[in-house]
Amino acid sequence: MPMLSEKKANHMNSKSIKVDYIARVEGEGALTVKMKDGQVSDVKFRIFEPPRFFEAFLRGRKYSEAPDITARICGICPIAYQMSSVHAMENLFQVKVGGQLRELRRLLYCGEWIESHALHIYMLHAPDFLGYDDAIQLAGDHPDAVQRGLRLKKAGNDLVALLAGREIHPINVKVGGFYKLPDRKDFDGVLESLKRARDEAYETVIWTSKLSFPDFESDYEFVALSHPDEYPFNEGRLVSNMGLNIDIRDYELVFHESHVEYSNALQSTMKNPRTSDSQVSQDESRGAYLTGPLARFNLNFEKLSPIALKGAEEANIRPPVLNPFKSIVVRAIETLYACDEAIRIIENYDAPENSAVTFQVRPGFGFGCTEAPRGILYHRYLIGDDGLIKDAKIVPPTAQNQKMIESDLRNFVSSNIKMSKQDLTLRCEQVVRNYDPCISCATHFVRLDISEEL
Amino acid sequence: MAQRRTAGKPKVAVFKFASCDGCQLSLLDAEESLLDVAGAIDIAFFPEASRRMLRGPYDVGIVEGSITTPHDVEHIRAIRKSCGALITIGACATAGGIQALRNWKDIRNFVHIVYASPEYISTLDRSLPVGSFVHVDFELRGCPINKYQLIEVINAFINKRKPNIRTYSVCMECKMKGNECVMVAHGEPCLGPVTQAGCGAICPSFNRGCYGCFGPMESPNTPALSTKLNELGESKHDIKLAFRTFNAYADAFRKESESHE
């Protein structure tokens, strides 16, 4: 709820923007920007949701429980957690899930991208651009757009429910593959709805491209997975536009997490990586980086399918996209791609004989990193001789984007310091929502900070 | 700009405590009903969906998440006072959630790097359901809840009738679906016999045993199930873990897991 400290501001030649509970994001966060003598003096994006200690209570659980337990970190992107965890275990057990099983995992991820992106585009983000409090109010004036968004979201959800039992915390993913495979004919209904969704995703690209965007760009370091043959979901190397190119198992050599007093989520920063694995250096701090749709799009543009590229061309958007407000268009392009990719996978689907591949459980470290709708989601597990988890580390995308969100707030307010406080407050909220932050995800970590009272 | 027509409609608020957001998302996931539901009620406070945040009192409060901090305790008491009826949704709010696994640990070991103020440790060492602190008018189970059940409960409360939510076991749903029993036919450990229905017996329908995400049914015979699980080759440790997941601190599951310590 916006609260402006006007009285104080006039008195001290300083003012502040304070939003105690940022709406239309997943979870509980707040922001404060302080200004003094025409300059931004302090910026905080605070996560005050209480921590839930996932890494701590994963200790002693079975390796096979990781996908179902870590899914509960986030009700919006449970599949991302299931995918990163099973890939980490398979990395350790040296098991390769290929062929149609690999395709089905991609398909499942398409479903999550579609529902998550449609939710954000239509229900969380678009109301900012068009001047409404929420999608329900938006539906009063733009019923067709909101209905289109709901149908798109439903197409993604229906795909997830068909493949994995239900939309939230689906139950069909396990280490090695799935519990049960669909038959080709099971897809008939969802294939029709996905074809309609693809058309409506195309309309969404055009619709979002006509919104009005503030003039705001930054010189970001974008980080995303990159795969030689495909737009990334589950596999690839971690790359950036500033020379990063590493195996995911070197993640912790490059990215560093730290605790700041005012946030219940650890903030990530980048150390000073060189271009190849062997030269990873830890000496110098490189700072904030951006993960998510903008990073994926800018780093993997040429891997998009023809229809997604056509949509991008018609929307007149091409890499590098440096304006975070335009992430809404990029999400629409990714939604279009995910619909198209889902249709491709279904049309080529031929049920394999076994729903999962067999493997031998072995002790050691396993690493997984996949592309959640909001960006890279890193998991690392240490498994003991008994198959139980001895240690777990999970770094969600929102924790990684926190510093960049603060940096955007600082830069945006600095260059718009004369804007009215009411407008600036709304814009600051929008700067946060550009990242589709999932605060519930970010607040999973093991440390406590409860001295903060609100 | 379109004006909201809110006069005379019941004011509904949605609150969040420690949780994954999935249960309140279920409301937004009810794509086909969402605009109808939104037309029947005045969504007065639902930060995940709207910037419009009206003050109470509210006719109906919907609460997601478990109580884990001293601030939460104060907050839920204030919410109780501001709501005519209070509905809790999901395993976190009704049983403490997966984060209740801390309840068996010493929080000081759990948080080996602690920023905690020591005076708060006593209340923070457990994750508890909302009903441990205030009166709750209806508890809707599930991790996550079933969105159709959520709409039924909202509908019941705004029409001042009793929600039609079954409290029998998942086995009943399997029978109604005509599923082959995964435990009898395939020897798969399954919590279906002691778990409340509501999911639609999804896991057995996908060839896996139920893992109890809707929590204990009314009067479950958990010891009998543990005996059966043991016959299937599950160790004491396995059985303890099986009862200790998303509804670990629900009474019947808590007691059963503790009997396998």
Image: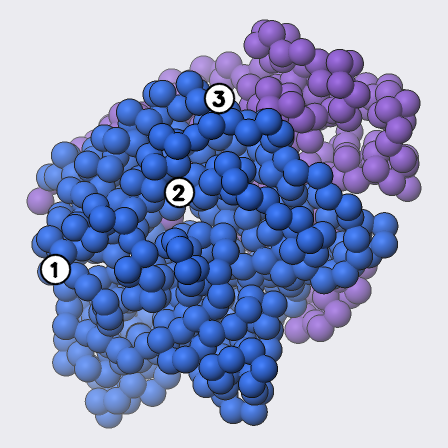
Chain colours: A blue, B purple
Q: Secondary structure at mark 3?
A: loop
Please determine if labels 1 and 2 lie on a single subunit.
yes
Query: Disc 2 is attached to a residue of which chain?
Result: A
Which class describes the residues within 10 Å of circle 2: few (<14), some (14-19), or many (20+)?
many
In this rendering, would B108 be left or right of A136?
right
Q: Which residue is mark 3?
A: A183
**Residue at x 34% of width, y 42% of height:** A341
Quick one: label 2 or label 3, which is nearer the N terminus? 2
Q: Quadrant of residue A297?
A: bottom left
Q: Name the quadrant containing residue B6.
A: top left
Mark 1: which secondary structure?
loop
| Amino acid at dot 3 | Asp
Q: Give me the chain letter of mark 1.
A: A
Residue at (69, 64) in percent of width and height: B120
Measure the C-alpha gap from mark 3 to mark 1: 40 Å
Image coordinates for residue A9, horizontal then vertical, percent: 26, 82
Residue A140 percent coordinates (x, y)? 14, 36
At mark 2, the secondary structure is: helix
**Mark before the other along the chain sequence, 3 or 1:** 3
Tell which subunit mark 3 falls on. A
**Residue tagged 2:** A110
Q: Which mark is residue A426?
A: none
Q: Nearer the viewer, mark 2 or mark 3?
A: 3
Q: CA distance from mark 2 to mark 3?
A: 18 Å
- Residue A178 position in % (x across, y down): 60, 34
Which residue is depicted at the point 51% across and 27% down? Answer: A351
The residue wearing badge 1 is A316
Q: Is residue A126 above or below residue A188?
A: below
Name the kind of residue labelled 1 in the image.
Asn
- Residues marked 2 and 3, same chain: yes
**Viewer-nearest of labels 3 and 1?**
3
For disc 3, the neighbor class at 10 Å (few under 14, some 14 to 19, many from 20) is few
